[in-house]
Image (tube, rainbow, N blue to C red):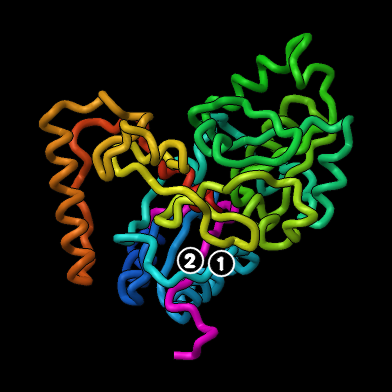
Amino acid sequence: MDPVTPRYLTVALYQFVDLPDCAALRAPLQALCDEHGVRGMLLLAPEGINGTIAGAPATVHAVLAWLRSDPRFAALQHKEAPTERQPFYRMRVRLKREIVTLGVPDLNPARNAGTYVKPEDWNALIDDPGVVVVDTRNDYEVGIGTFERAINPHTRSFAEFPAWVAQQSQPGGVLAGKPRVAMFCTGGIRCEKSTAFLKSQGFDEVFHLEGGILKYLATVPENNSRWHGDCFVFDERVSVGHGLAPGHHQLCRSCRMPLGEVELASPHYVRGVSCPYCHGTRTPEQERALAERQRQMDLADQRGQVHLGARQPGNPARAITRDEVGREDDSA
């Protein structure tokens, strides 16, 4: 193998486009990915496509080429990152009402999104004190990294964002008077919808980071960066930093929260079983099942086998919604 060619390639993609026949695309797209050994998650909806996939570079590019052979996806953009391990266990192509769930009908991000700002121009925009900078990601994502001056809406899901906008548009709120607003997310998809939503609410000057945090981290040198911390991604990498290098977080296999050094050092962290966020939320039977699951995964890893894992016992304390894959995720 060429030493500069990665063993695997992880690709995040999305596009808002009218896709009334999305159901007809599901089976052939699933079959194509299975044929090429590509894994991950792709969401199809009448408003477009969203997802993250990974596989050998040639096979991933074959899937992208197949998509772009459809004139509606000719302008499909993607972001890629090399990895030495397959970050997904299986491949699923799913049908959804929205490719990222906001719950506001009749929005059309393909025609009414905000103004794109390139990564190299982002610093100048968010340094402007007259611009309100909003992180549109969920609270647990913001908690491990964000931009300077960014406001955290403390949402548990993207569907809570419209209520936050309504609240903060009232007198005394950060959006009162409809100021200039700059928004960002992992890969850009949530901002397509959030900027379209703000414009539908009468905001005239709405901007969003083109390509999202991932494009910024891949483009802007660390010594000139306004980003602090890691960026959560919706795959087995868990988080990435500048240059899209692997971040400093692991994933709790019980509740799927990202864990940093402090959480990993907690007495409530038991690998594969619990962490400070979900400690005490499982029954003894569920904890034993999780411990056995982790034991089986460790054995499979020692044998060089892939362990797909069992469904987590009971309801997770906080499950990551795969509406927001690609990651963000909305890693896309």
Residue type highlighted by circle 1: Glu
**Residue on which disc 1 sits:** 80
> Residue 216 falls in which quadrant of the image?
bottom right
Is residue 120 found left or right of 4 in the rendered image?
A: right
Q: Relative to 94, say whether 77 is above or below.
A: below
Residue 47 on image: x %, y %: 54, 47
**Relative to 53, is 243 on the left or the right?**
right
In the image shown, does 118 or 292 lie closer to the viewer?
292
Dots 2, 1 in contact, CB < 8 A: yes
Q: Is residue 55 above or below residue 201?
A: below
**Based on the displayed image, in which of its 4 quarters is residue 106 positioned?**
top right
Amino acid tagged 2: Thr
- Which residues make up the magenta segment? 1-24
According to the image, label 2 marks what residue?
Answer: 10
Q: Sequence order check: which comes first, mark 2 or mark 1?
A: 2
Q: Position of residue 239 (x, y in %)?
A: 51, 51
Q: Could you say whether the residue bearing mark 2 is in a helix, strand or loop?
A: strand
Q: Quadrant of the N terminus?
A: bottom left
Tell me the number on the disc at residue 295.
Answer: none
Residue 12, magenta (yes or no): yes
Could you tell me which residue is drawn at 60 percent across and 51 percent down?
A: 187
Q: CA distance from mark 2 to mark 1?
A: 5 Å
**Residue 48: in magenta span:** no
Residue 255 in view here: yes
Q: Identify the residue shown where x is 13% and y is 28%.
A: 284
Vertical side of 6 occupied by 162: above or below:
above
The residue under the point 72% across, 57% down is 222
Q: Is residue 19 visible?
A: no
Corner quadrant of residue 317:
top left
Q: Position of residue 299 (x, y in %)?
A: 16, 61
**Residue lying furthest top:** 171
- Around disc 2, counting alpha carbons within 10 Å, would you say few (fewer than 14), some (14 to 19), or many (20 or more)? many
